[in-house]
Amino acid sequence: MRGYDGALAGVTILCHPENFRFPQPMRVHPTEPFFCYAPQQLGEMAIEPGKPYVSRYQIIIADGAVSPEQADAWWEEWAGKK
């Protein structure tokens, strides 16, 4: 992704392992620059009255490209896997 000044920026969005149906599938728009996590793609789900539905995500914006190794390290630290 490029910023307003043309410099490369990295965006990493982490899905927590306690989230419903982890790892959650993602929907990526074919022509627009957006996506969403979509656990309902794997089947029916219900949000029951009085029972909160909680999902945890972490968004990391970085200067420059992000390597897969760095993204994995962030996820392991955030998810309590280290």
Image: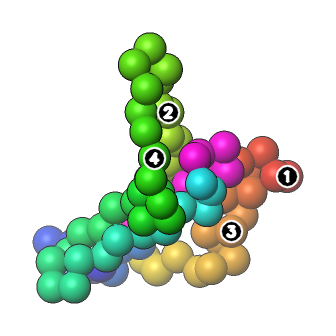
Residue 35, by quadrant, is: bottom left
Q: In this view, does 35 lie to the left or right of 71?
A: left
Label number found at residue 82: 1
The residue carrying mark 3 is 72
Residue 7, by quadrant, is: bottom left
Q: Which residue is drawn at 24% across and 69% down?
A: 34
The residue carrying mark 4 is 45
Q: Is residue 9 visible to the viewer in this orientation of the structure?
A: yes
Q: Is mark 3 on a helix, strand or loop?
A: helix
- Given the image, on which type of amino acid does mark 2 rest? Val
- Given the image, on which type of amino acid does mark 4 rest? Met
Is 15 colored magenta in this rendering?
yes
Q: Is residue 63 visible to the viewer in this orientation of the structure?
A: no
Residue 65: percent from left, percent from top: 46, 80
- Given the image, on which type of amino acid does mark 3 rest? Asp
Q: Which of marks 4 and 1 is nearer the N terminus?
A: 4
Residue at the extreme top of the image, as rendered: 50
Front residue (pair 78, 4) = 78
Is 60 colored magenta in this rendering?
no
Q: In this view, does 38 lie to the left or right of 15?
A: left
Q: Give neighbour class at mark 2: few <14, some 14-19, many 20+ (Cα, 10 Å).
A: few
Q: Residue at x 48, y 60 (%)?
A: 43
Q: Nearer the viewer, mark 4 or mark 1?
A: 4
Q: Which residue is drawn at 59% across and 46% down?
A: 19
Q: Give the range drawn in magenta.
A: 11-20
Front residue (pair 40, 77) = 40
Q: Nearer the viewer, mark 2 or mark 4?
A: 4
Q: What element carries label 2?
A: loop
Q: Earlier in the sequence, mark 2 or mark 4?
A: 4
The residue carrying mark 2 is 54
Distance between mark 2 and mark 4 Cα atoms: 13 Å
Residue 75: percent from left, percent from top: 66, 58
